[in-house]
Image (tube, rainbow, N blue to C red):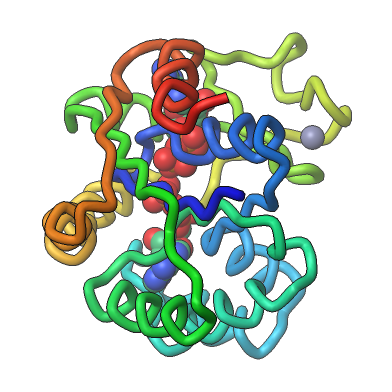
Amino acid sequence: MKRLVLLGPPGAGKGTQAVKIAARYEIPYISTGDILRRNIKEGTALGKKAQEYMDHGELVPDDLVIALVEDRLTWEDCNNGFLLDGFPRTIYQAESFDKYLAQKDMKLSVVLNIRVPEEILLPRIIGRRVCKTCGATYHVSSMPPKAEGVCDLCGGELHQRADDAEETVLNRFKVYQAQTAPLIDYYETADEIAHIDGAASQDAVFDAIVDILGA
Ligand code: ADP
Ligand code: ADP
Ligand code: ZN
C-alpha cells in the first residue's frame, strides 16, 4: 500500500516518473493539473473558474483544488493507495490535506521531492510536447516521438501546453518558489520526505525512486 506525493518545480519530471510509478506499484495516478486541463477542455464550471489562473501561470484557488482532490480520493481505485502529482502546492493545501488524512485514519508513505537546478528546467519545459488524445509526454530533443508531432502510443497529435510559453513559465517558477517550495521544509519537519536528483536521466531517476520505495 503506497500513498505518495510527488513534489518538484515545473519541468522536474513529475509527470514522466508518475506514469512509471503508478504502473509499477499499481496505484492510480492523480494529477491536479491534468484534471484541471480536462475540465477546461470540457467546459465544466470548475474549468471555467480555473482557466484564467492557469493561463497566467498562477495557482487555482485552494478551496477548488482541495475539493477536487478530496472527491477523487473517494473513488474505489484509491483503496490500495494513490500517487498525487501537483498537490498539495501551498502550505494551506498541505495542512488541509493532513487533516483529511487524519480523519480517514490514513498516513502518507512518503513525499518524493524531485530536485532539478533551474537552468535545466526551462529547456525541458519549452521542449515539452503532450499528446492531445492520451496525455503522454514527450520532449523535442531528450524524448522525441518516433514520428514528429505524432504520439507513439495512440497516434494522437502532439501539442505544446498553453502555459508552457516562456513568459508564463518564468511566472510559474516564481509561484513555485513563493508558494510551493516551502512545502519541502513542511514535510522535512514531519519527517515524511525523500529527495531525488531529478537532473539525471529518466531511467536513473526512476531507479532512485524504486530504491526509496522498495520492490
Ligand atoms: P513535470 O510534470 O514535473 O512538469 P514532465 O514530466 O512533464 O515534468 O517533464 C518535463 C519535460 O522534461 C518533458 O518534456 C519530459 O519529456 C522531459 N523530461 C522529464 N524527465 C527528464 C529527464 N530525466 N531528463 C531529460 N528530460 C526529461
Ligand atoms: P507543472 O508541474 O508543469 O507545473 P501542472 O500540470 O502540475 O504543471 O499544473 C498546471 C497548472 O495547474 C498550475 O500552474 C496551476 O495553475 C494549476 N494547478 C495544478 N495543481 C494545482 C494545485 N494543487 N493548486 C493550485 N493550482 C494548481
Ligand atoms: Zn497519445
Mark yes or no: residue 177 visible.
no
Q: Is residue 149 above or below residue 186?
A: above
Q: Relative to 95, is 138 on the left or the right?
A: right
Q: How many numbered circles are shown?
A: 0
Task: Where is residue 34? Give x, y as percent.
Answer: 60, 57
Residue at the front extreme of this rendering: 105
Task: Where is residue 8? Give x, y as percent.
Answer: 31, 44
Q: Nearer the viewer, residue 16 or 53?
A: 16
Give the residue at x 40% y 29%. 212
Q: Nearer the viewer, residue 76 or 33?
A: 76
Task: Where is residue 94? Give x, y as percent.
Answer: 31, 72
User: In which image quadrant can residue 12 be found?
Assistant: top left
Residue at the right extreme of this rendering: 154
User: In which image quadrant can residue 133 be found?
Assistant: top right
User: In which image quadrant can residue 48 be found?
Assistant: bottom right
Q: Relative to 32, is 76 on the left or the right?
A: right
Q: Is residue 157 above or below residue 102?
A: above
Q: Is residue 23 above or below residue 37?
A: above
Give the residue at x 52% y 55%. 3
Give the residue at x 68% y 73%. 39
